[in-house]
Amino acid sequence: MTDLNHLEHDLITQVEAAGDEAALETVRVAALGKKGSVSELLKTLGAMSPEERKERGPLINGLRDKVQTAIATKKETLAEAALDVRLAAERVDVTLPVQEGPETRGRIHPISQVIEELTAIFADMGFSVAEGPDIETDYLNFTALNFPEGHPAREMHDTFFLAPDEKGERKVLRTHTSPVQVRTMMSQKPPIRVICPGRTYRHDSDQTHTPMFHQVEGLVIDTEANIAHMKWILEEFCKAFFEVEQVKMRFRPSFFPFTEPSAEVDIQCSRKGGEIRFGEGEDWLEILGCGMVHPNVLRNCGLDPDQYQGFAWGMGIDRIAMLKYGMPDLRPFFEADVRWLNHYGFRPLDIPSLVSGLTS
Ligand code: 2NL
């Protein structure tokens, strides 16, 4: 046997003997790698005389081709064998329950849920949603809303003030979402119908108050928008939100700097054994404040009070969420405890709508 025949026999035997892909790779590197036996032979071609090269060239190249083919074939055989082993060992049990993905495992926070519910209800009555920044100017948070200078609500114990800027202006963390309605009146022409849900901040912390909480306010401005419209809208909202057919409401005279007249609104409820039900019983529960927008506020927002009038209301989202879903304590709302969220949270794919139901 020639040297080449010898080498070929050797290499093919090694290829055949390789038990797995790693062993085959070792054989490949030893033959065809940079310093492999076949590669070294190929390098000798350069130094040969033309006649010698004519004779040896096809033999050496032929050897390389045979080894390459053998390796490729063996590789395929090994891959098939490996797949057969897996197919024999692994079984798919189609009777096992479906693994839950994040879209079904996750939970929607009750506050987000309630905001979605409010939005669905008011959208049905033609309202759009407006948003604004959490950090506001003193003017938009207070002055435009007819708070007199030195009004107690501006004091340090209620409001978080930011450090004064170069001009000495102190920005505030908005204490209500009213500045969003002010921005809306300043930038849009009536008729206006908006709700403004969002975060609000007050320097207050106990069992029923957190320094950050959520409010939703609503605003209607038109040429003849009046208290009758306001009462109808608020009643429709309460029935839809608490999912009852009828609910009595009580409007008690009150005071806000930005409305005149102003009222606080209670809804009818029953309290039995710690459980509150709405639309029945003889008890009352305060749920929101409202009123006709003060002419000074309209003027401050660039609207002529002789041409336009309207009404507004505001309520605490955290509070109505607690009432609707029977949550006794406000503090866990903001503790990000997944156990609490698993208990009180909502399924992400159950999106509130008036057609399919606010809550399924
Ligand atoms: C409450 C009471 C209220 C408003 C908010 C408002 C906004 C503008 C003009 C006039 Cl821009 N009013 N908002 C009106 C009445 C009551 O909130 O108890 N909130 C928790």
Image (spheres, rainbow, N blue to C red):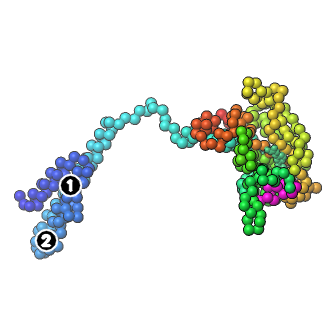
**Amino acid type, residue under disc 1 in the picture:** Val
Please give the range of residues in magenta.
137-149
The vertical placement of 86 against 63, above or below, is above
Placement of the N terminus among the 4 image quadrants? bottom left
Residue 276, x across and y down, in percent:
75, 29
Q: Residue at x 79, y 27 (%)?
A: 270
Above or below: residue 241 compared with residue 13: above
Q: Amino acid at mark 2?
A: Arg
> Residue 230, position in %: x, y?
86, 43
139 drawn magenta: yes
Q: Residue furthest right?
A: 306
* 309 relative to 94 in the view: left or right: right
Q: Residue at x 22, y 58 (%)?
A: 29
Mark 1: C-beta under 8 Å from nearest atom of ligand 1: no
In primary-sequence order, the first of circles 1 and 2 is 1
Given residues 30 and 261, the one toward you in this image is: 261
Residue 186 position, x and y percent, is 81, 59
Displayed quadrant of residue 104:
top right
Residue located beneath label 1 in the image: 27
Nearer to us of marks 1 and 2 is: 1
Residue at x 83%, y 32% (from the top left corner): 284
Left or right: 210 with respect to 98? Answer: right
Q: CA distance from mark 1 to mark 2?
A: 27 Å
Residue 53, disc: 2
Which residue sits at x=89%, y=42%?
254
**Figure check: 177 above or below 59:** above
Residue 90 belongs to magenta span? no
Q: Quadrant of the C terminus?
A: top right
Q: Secondary structure at mark 2?
A: helix
Q: Give percent across and percent down for residue 320.
A: 74, 38
Mark 1: few/some/many CA within 10 Å (<14, 14-19, 20+): many
